[in-house]
Amino acid sequence: MSYEIPRENIAAEPFMAGPPDFNRKSRLMQTDKVYECMITNIVELTDMEKLFHLKIMDPGESRLFTFRPGQFLMLELPGFGEIPISISGSSAIRERIGLCIRKAGKVTNMLHKARIGTKVGVRGPFGTHFPLERMVGHNILLIAGGLGLAPLRAPIYWVNEHRSEYADVAIMYGTKRPKDILFDYQFDMWGKIYNYDIHLIVEEPDENWKGRVGLITELFNEVDIDPHRTYAIVCGPPVMFKFVCNHLNQVGIPMDRMFVTLERRMHCGMGKCCRCMVGSTFTCVDGPVMDYWTVMNLKEAI
C-alpha cells in the first residue's frame, strides 16, 4: 500500500499575500543584538526596588533604539546571567532607559549591589505593546498593584506626551503597605501637571498613613466609569487581574478593551526556549501585553 504526501502550496501562505519583506532578516537580527550600556543613575525606591537609568554607550545605537509602552528588555549582567525586565520610562527619551528592578534572585541581587558606571548589556525590545492608538479619544483607567506601577509608567508618559488626544485619565494604585509604594515623588506631577486623577490605597496601614485602606477594587467607588468610552490597562500580580477585570466587565467595559501584562518564565525573549509557553502561545512573543479576553481563553495563563 502506498500513498502520496500532498505538496505544500506556498502561494497560499499568509506571508505571500503582500509584497516581499526584504528587511525581515535584519529586523530579527536586531532583536538579538546586545547593546552595551552603562548605569548612569540609581534611585532607591523601597527596600526591595531600585530604578536604574541606563545609557547606550554607542551614540549611533542610542539613536536607533526605540520601544513602545508595554515592551520589555533582556538585561544581562556579565558573569551572572540575563533576566527580562519591563521598560519603565518614556519612549520619547532615547538617551536613557529606565528599569525598575526588584531584588528577587541571583541576577537582581547582584544588580542591587551595582554602582553608577557599571556596564551591562540589553537586548530588545521584545513583545507586544499597549495599543494606545486605539484608545485615542477615550477615557483611560491605569490600574496597578505593587510592582505593576513600573511597567505602567511607560503608558503614563506616553499619554501625557499626547495629552490632547485622550479624554479623562485615572491612575488607581494599591500596595500591601505604605512603605511598598513606588514613585510617590511623581504623584503630584502626574496629578497637577499631567491632569490625571490619582487614587491610592494600601491593605496594611501604618501610623502615618492617612489615605484609603483596603483592596484596590474599593477604589472603583471613587471613579465614575463610562463603559462606552473607557479603556483599561491593568498591571500587577496575575491574581489581581480576575478581581479587577471582572469588576470592569460588570460595569460594562468589554474584555477586549482591557489590557494586562503577563510575565511567565520568560528566558530568551524570542520564543526559542519555550519556557514561557502557555498552551500554543509564547508569552515573550505573543505577549506580554494581551487583552483580557485572550487571557481568559488561555489555559493556566492566570
Image (spheres, rainbow, N blue to C red):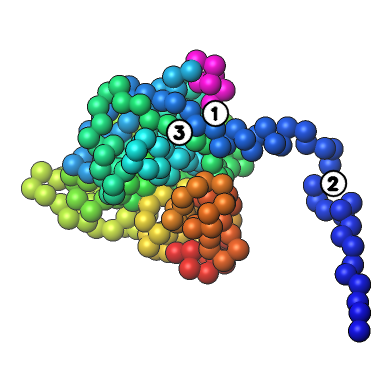
- Residue 40 colored magenta? no
Q: Is residue 210 above or below residue 113?
A: below
Q: Residues within 10 Å of mark 1 (few under 14, many from 20)?
A: some
Depth order, front residue of 282/253: 282
Label number found at residue 122: 3
Residue 284, image x and y in percent? 53, 50
Where disc 2 sits, the SS reads helix
Using the numbered discs, state the Cα–Cα distance from disc 3 to disc 2 in whole angstroms: 33 Å
Per the picture, the main secondary structure of the magenta-coloured stretch is helix
Tell me if residue 76 can be seen. Answer: yes
Describe residue 137's horizontal placement relative to residue 207 as left or right: right
Give the quarter of the image for residue 208: top left
Q: Please, what secondary structure does the residue beneath circle 3 have?
A: strand
Residue 144 position in % (x across, y down): 37, 48
Q: Which residues are magenta?
A: 59-65
Q: Residue at x 50, y 15 (%)?
A: 59
Q: Nearer the viewer, residue 15 or 10?
A: 10
Residue identifier under label 1: 66
- Does residue 300 lie above or below 170 as drawn? below
Q: Is residue 161 visible?
A: no
Please state which of the two labelled residues, at mark 3 or mark 2, is closer to the viewer: 3
- Residue annotated with mark 2: 16
